[in-house]
Image (cartoon, helix red, strand yellow):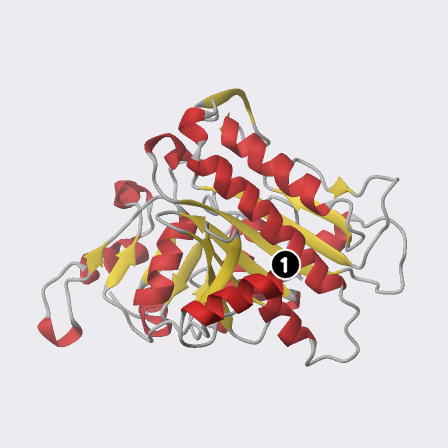
Amino acid sequence: MLDLLIEETLETQVTGKILTIQRHIMEMERQYPQASGDFSGLLYDICMAAKQISYHVNKAGLMNLLGKEGTENVHGEQVKKLDIFAHETFVKALDHGGHLCVMGSEEERDIIPIPEEYPIGKYVCLFDPLDGSSNIDVNVSIGTIFSIHKRVDPSETGAGTLEDCLQPGWKQVCAGYVIYGSSTMIVYTAGNGVHGFTLDPSYGEFILSHENIQIPKRGSIYSVNESNFDYWDEGFKNYIRWVKKIDEKTNRPRNCRYIGSMVADIHRNLLYGGVFCYPADLKDPSKPSGKLRLLYEAAPMAFIVEQAGGKATTGTQRILDIEPDGLHQRVPVIIGSEEDVTVVEEFMQGLRV
């Protein structure tokens, strides 16, 4: 009832179609008479977690949430206080609704079971609770990434397993991200296009602001951490050399824009066009496949970008086709506008020099 009152108020103030994310989800659900409402309920819980994290991100400097927590996570990285808060917020928001059978978080070594006192559902949720956390203390945009699968055996009613989490990206039923920046936005796809919703702080609701997002076929931006240049293979180095050369016919040089938060970099490129790259490098022998995690970052972002008309590969393989072999598997990521990604692939595969 509150949602409907808010929407009616908005519609009297603004000409045009005003949709909250809840109403948008309900309208999509009506297209599937067999829908149980579990999926919608899960998305509502994710929205609630996003609102809580957004509030605390905006107040972090006043609530003793900046800085390091003093421990290392499963990846050997220093944990920030907001990392812990975001992780706990997501777990608490999703563990009791009866929609999930198991969860996985970038901050946890193993799968996260649903507590025994709560009902078991048919979905799996994997998430990076706070992407770009190295930017927290300097007030740069950060985000949350989430991925939803159905459990492997839909007839199973018991607790979820590792097998339920280790599914290829093409089996995702939904993926999305939240960006905490000048405004807070949630962008998601359920396999029928990509839609963006901006949080209106006056009403506390996500309002449809970017309907049916389509990434341009080619952009003028490339996003990469060029300080790693000497650690890359020759094919990718050749791409960087090429993209910086002057050639008016091919709109070069391109503009380098690198924020250091995957959510922020991809969000910009999704709207403006361009390519985001995090290739494998030799900088850290313990990470021969690069830095980004398949299940928590690469696969959900690949699903979103492909649904928007873009492309996502490792440079040699479509990301959504990769069969995961571990919760924290890392993969190279080349993602963005279709034509731009294809050019990077050609250099990485030695088809261009």
User: 88 or 28, which lies in front?
Assistant: 28
Q: Quadrant of the C terminus?
A: bottom left
* Picture coordinates of residue 19, whole percent (x, y): 52, 69
The quadrant where residue 238 appears = bottom left
Residue drawn at x 40%, y 75% as measured from the top left: 15
Q: Is residue 174 above or below residue 286?
A: below
99 displayed left or right of 15: right
User: 337 or 163, which lies in front?
Assistant: 337
User: 351 or 109, which lies in front?
Assistant: 109
Mark 1, residue position: 2
* Picture coordinates of residue 285, whole percent (x, y): 46, 36
Q: Quadrant of the N terminus?
A: bottom right
> Label 1's element?
helix
Residue drawn at x 38%, y 47% as measured from the top left: 181
* Picture coordinates of residue 255, whole percent (x, y): 19, 58
Residue drawn at x 71%, y 38% as measured from the top left: 110
4 displayed left or right of 312: right
Residue drawn at x 89%, y 64% as measured from the top left: 155
Answer few, some or many: residues within 10 Å of disc 1's Cα (few below 14, many 20 plus, some between 14 and 19). few
Q: Amino acid at mark 1?
A: Leu
